[in-house]
Amino acid sequence: MLRAMPPRLGAFLAIAFWGVSFVATKAALSEVSPITLVFTRSAIGAVLLIAILGLRGEPLVPPRDTWAMLAVMGFVGVFFHQMLQAWGLTLTSAVNTGWLIGLIPIWSAVLSAIVLRERFGPVKLLGLGLGAIGAAVVVTRGKFDTGAFALPSTRGDLLILASTVNWAIYTVLGTATLRRLGAKRATVGAITLGTLMLAPVFIARSGWREYALLTPGGWGALLFLGVGCSALGYLFWYAALERLEASRVAAFLYVEPLVTLAAAAVLLGEPVTLTAVVGGLIVLAGVMLVQSARSQTGTA
């Protein structure tokens, strides 16, 4: 199936899943707690990915010397990251979340410059500055005064902002392991171990009792997150990366905030404010500058 699918279509479908994920998360959080949502989503994704790899005859158990790093990746990229986003979405809108998520490539470039000693010239600095300005516009709603950081919505935006930095950290941390195991095997390992870390909290909170509160729409949102976003989205994305240049695949990331914007407006009825759109476009401009500078210097 993955080989028959055009790689650009696979990349677009992955971005569509991930763009709508914030809307589905927001909808599910109206019925269940963040821990129940995150554990269930991760568990569904892990089981499905393990089954797919097994059917394809790929090794399921990674080498023992990678377990420690996969555990770190599971904590940073699954446990901590998903909880940050879930808690943030209880306090802010899916629209704001979509725009702020666009900052991830900028933070990745900053960390690569610090940790991997990649070049970080004036164009990248300009892109970073634009990204920071755009994020500030989204978070403060364009009101740079004493009321700009009024709670609770701003607290949610700041949690989402923290999650973008956290994901960039996850990306840099996992680079060597991803290259050694391959993206699919490393992702399955990280998601599985992250789910196992979430399980004690889920059990301690008796999260399974919340399943009785779920409406058909809530179950649909959870299944979409687990099957579409945590399993198929990753498979489609990595299948595209295996057949196209990374820069061509990464270009699809620019579409993600627009998918979130449209889905939040249509499915949740969230207002689309001019301030959020302007701030988001500034973020995207900064990201595009950073990405273009990376391709010109030959660094990743």
Image (cartoon, grey):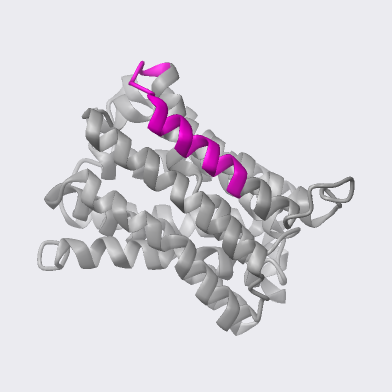
Is 62 on the left or on the right of 79, as rendered?
left
Dominant secondary structure of the magenta stretch? helix
Is 232 on the left or on the right of 105, as rendered?
left
Q: Is residue 132 magenta?
A: yes
Q: Is residue 131 visible?
A: yes
> Which of 165 and 102 lies nearest the eye of the viewer?
102
Please name the residue shown 33% across and 21% down the image: 119
Magenta segment:
115-134
- Relative to 71, say whether 9 is above or below: below
Residue 92 locus on image (x, y percent): 72, 60
Residue 124 locus on image (x, y percent): 41, 32
Q: Is residue 192 visible?
A: no
Please name the residue shown 48% across and 62% down the image: 257
Please name the residue shown 37% across and 58% down the image: 231
Residue 260 locus on image (x, y percent): 51, 67
Q: Quadrant of the N terminus?
A: bottom left
